[in-house]
Image (cartoon, rainbow, N blue to C red):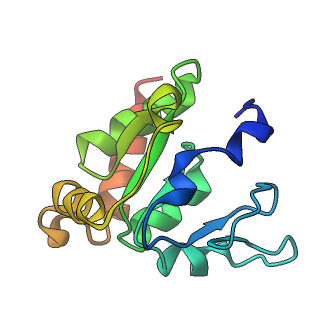
Amino acid sequence: MKIDVSLLEQLPIWDSPNCVFVVSSNVQVNRSNVFQIPIEYLESQNYIAASDLVISKAGWGMIGEAVSANIPLLILNRLSMKEDQNTTNYLKQYHLCETINWEDFITYKIDSSMINDLKESLRGNDSDHQNQSEKIAKDLMRILEGM
């Protein structure tokens, strides 16, 4: 995301109570509650499925796995990335994510009530979000036909 990686170590999020963080192998944060996914491990969806919350940029792989596993998403908003904006707008329309700007994220901390509130507000009725592949395919076809 073109951020100063030395800043990552000092973010208050790592001090969130009762939280364990699983991060990409390229995230260099040395804390007792932060674990890197080994670079040779290719099944990151297993880590996502075991999570209470996924915080990510709007990459399709991560988002697809989180939505499939019914895991709440907090997406780092990158206003300069049109593709990200299209993705997050779609996800927000269907109550599948919340976004946070970097300026707000650098002071962000997680607590259990926030995760519970996020799960409730984003998912509402879980049956609305189960196997939406047909709906997504129809929406994509509509977009492609309009090009």
Residue 132, above or below 89 = below
Residue in front for this viewpoint, 136 or 13: 13
The reply, left or right, for residue 3 in relation to residue 90 is right
Q: Measuring 44% from the left and 31% from the top, which residue is drawn there?
A: 104
Q: Is residue 66 visible?
A: yes
The reply, left or right, for residue 2 in relation to residue 73 is right
Q: Is residue 63 visible?
A: no
- Would you identify the image quadrant in which residue 26 lies? bottom right
Quarter placement of the N terminus? top right
Q: Measuring 71% from the left and 48% from the top, which residue is drawn there?
A: 9
In the rendered image, residue 68, in percent from the top left (x then y), is placed at 42, 70
**Number of marks drawn:** 0
Q: Measuring 53% from the left and 33% from the top, which residue is drawn there?
A: 84
- Would you identify the image quadrant in which residue 78 lies? top right
In the rendered image, residue 102, in percent from the top left (x then y), is placed at 53, 30
Residue in front for this viewpoint, 138 or 111: 111
Residue 91, above or below 28 = above
